[in-house]
Amino acid sequence: MFSLHPFDRKHFPTHLAMMVVGILVVTNQILANQPTVLNGERPADRRLEPLRHLNSYFPFSPAENPEAWRDRAKQVRNRMLVSLGLWPLPTRLPLQPVIHGLIDRGDYTVESVYFESMPGFFVTGNLYRPKEISGKVPGVVCPHGHWPDGRFHAKSDDEMIRDVARGGETFFAGGRNPVQARCVGLARLGCIVLQYDMLGYAENDQLSFELVHRFAKQLEEMNTLENWGLFSTQAEAHCQSAMGLQAYNSMRALDFLCGLPEVDASRLGVTGASGGGTQTFILCGIDDRPAVAFPAVMVSTAMQGGCTCENASGLRVGTGNVEMAALFAPKPLLLSAADDWTVEMETKGFPELQAHYEMMGAPDNVMLVNRTEFKHNYNTVSRHAMYHWFNKHLGLGLPEPIEERDYLPFSVNELSVWNGDHPAPPDDVAFERKLLRWWHDDSQRQLQEMSPGPRRETVAAALDVILGRRLNEDRSLEFEELSQSKSDDMVLTTGLLHNRCEGEVLPMVRLQPANATNRCAIWLAEHGKAGLFADDGAVRPVVQRLLDANIAVYGIDMLYQGEFLGVDQPLVRARQVDARMSISTPRKTSIRRDAGAYTFGFNHSVFAQRVHDVLSLVGYLQSHREDGGRIYMAAFRGSGHWAAAALAQCGDAIDGAVIDTGGFRFRNSLDMFDPDFLPGGAKYGDLPGMLGMGAPTPLWLAGEDDESAEWAVTAYRDVDAGENLTLAPPGTVDVEAEGVSWILNCE
């Protein structure tokens, strides 16, 4: 396939036009005389429907029993960790916390705090403590959400007049900053509270607000093969995102609280609203330490989080916010709904959560504050519900009802972390590059230092998320025969391979020798099943060699190949979610959203979907395999990368594979809408890492040498199957002929 290199981008329109013309000519030549299945119609495949996006519908279906939920919960949690770039978790280095600037307000104190979550990357915030502490007390972390100026937020007089009049706030002074208000309220209840800045807000500005929360267009100088920046193709290929950094900061915030001698680490709470609500249920989904949670006005089956900081590629493929919040069960979970995207939560999402908690044996541990008369908020009504919930489930032992009291809000100067004695750290693009480089190097070091077993388990779990499917014989795979023609030595059958479970339909050709045995070969090619045939429609000689050996040969059109497209519509770039769907409310907008997570956060990449198609064919053949039957796979002409990924997910279903990678690497792309782009594809050994996961399947590998295929070579040796990996000699001229000879020798 095609990828753009740095020297190409200047002339991209010219190259693109030439590519399209070239593909049209080649495709027309290849398809003109080939057997067709649908006579010009496209397959009725669900994947051709409009892409999912953050404003789609995300229902949650509770599991039938706790055992089934444990399996599903593991899948969802792994998806979260892998997609957020936290698999493996970054090395937890010493926080080196600094606490300064004590302010005494009589019954509570406030201090400024900063600590290091990654080398040179600082989390900033304020620490609220009860004035009188006896023994150990609960700790609460408070991510603020997308309120203007974050923890420095202050409503205008007009806003306060309206809020007080509507009953959303009781106190004109104390209600002016609802972020401070809940921290003060919790400190007065006896909790130690850390209110920390989101990336780009207040004093956490090493990564700018515009970058983290308003990213719109790729920056050429940051979209590079080395020393890349956030939201770039390389960042996406390595599972690096602003959302992942925020999630890790939240985990380190818990580390900080647990390190305070007065905090009872068994009684931890988390609460935030809006984007802070997203951080709350994400943290509670990936970290076991919180005991009680209140993600306010965020969890719903509707809009999933409109900001770039709330989206990561892969995160919501096949899941959504309600299910991620359900990971907290059976621990106490409080939710709230308002006149925003959560307005239907009472009837869509919450009943399913109630059923889920009942199934988990804790029906009283989930509650919804359904106050849809208020707009998007964390107002005094919600705060009072939170005080009651935390009082009950953190064991505060305070008499009910709890009434919030007024307080004097703190000024920006009083809450500031950085000053002359504590200077702010660097915040330039060099820091951004350095941060992502450390993140990358740390994960690679951890993977390399793992022993073979744990490394294989780690990579396998990651590929399950990144590729989105592994071989499963129970996927309702059926072949619908549509035509058949016979000659003296062969039967040519065309039809449709249905994956009923997934709504996927693949045009398929089967070439069956007259003296067919129980052996078959899957033949993958860049242009689909047309790769079985020469320009004149005859079976290609190299394929005929397999038929002459009485091996049946199967070819399919994968998604956006062959009959998925027709002869005049080559796929040059993958589909992208419309910009109007990449914001909280669908509307006409001039905002561009080139962040890949708005597309790949909800949809599999084309590459992954083509791998799914290979797995469907393997699964179909495996389900019809007779005793002693053998299945081979051959991938040439730009199809080796799909075969490599499929082999990783096949288990022992393939008896031998011939793969020509052509040296393909996910890390070599600068265009995340290239059809061969795969979010996370470069992180776990790139394509050789996938090849290694195919071990011990016998593999003849072309396009690589000992050095470039090191991940694969090591993986085969780790499972004592080094002899099962054969590297094609350098300079092999006819790779297809040599590969077919290898298959025939396997017999």
Image (cartoon, rainbow, N blue to C red):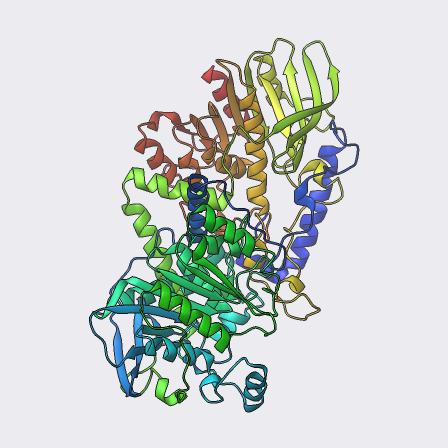
Quadrant of the rendered structure where residue 707 is?
Answer: top left
Residue 360 point in image, percent of width and height? 43, 47
Name the residue located 64 percent from the left edge and 40 percent from the top edge: 559
Total numbered circles: 0
Residue 225 point in image, percent of width and height? 47, 57
Could you say which is closer to the camera, residue 721 or residue 384?
384
Left/right of residue 524 with respect to residue 432 in the rendered view: right
Left/right of residue 702 with respect to residue 161 in the rendered view: left
For the question of whether residue 665 can be seen, the reply is: no
**Is residue 436 positioned above or below 210 on the image?**
above
Residue 1 point in image, percent of width and height? 59, 44
Quadrant of the rendered structure where residue 291 is?
Answer: bottom left
Could you say which is closer to the camera, residue 437 or residue 298?
298
Name the residue located 61 percent from the left edge and 24 percent from the top edge: 554
Residue 527 point in image, percent of width and height? 65, 36
Name the residue located 30 percent from the left edge and 46 percent from the top edge: 448
Could you say which is closer to the camera, residue 197 or residue 539?
197
For the question of whether residue 25 can be seen, the reply is: yes
Name the residue located 32 percent from the left edge and 47 percent from the top edge: 447
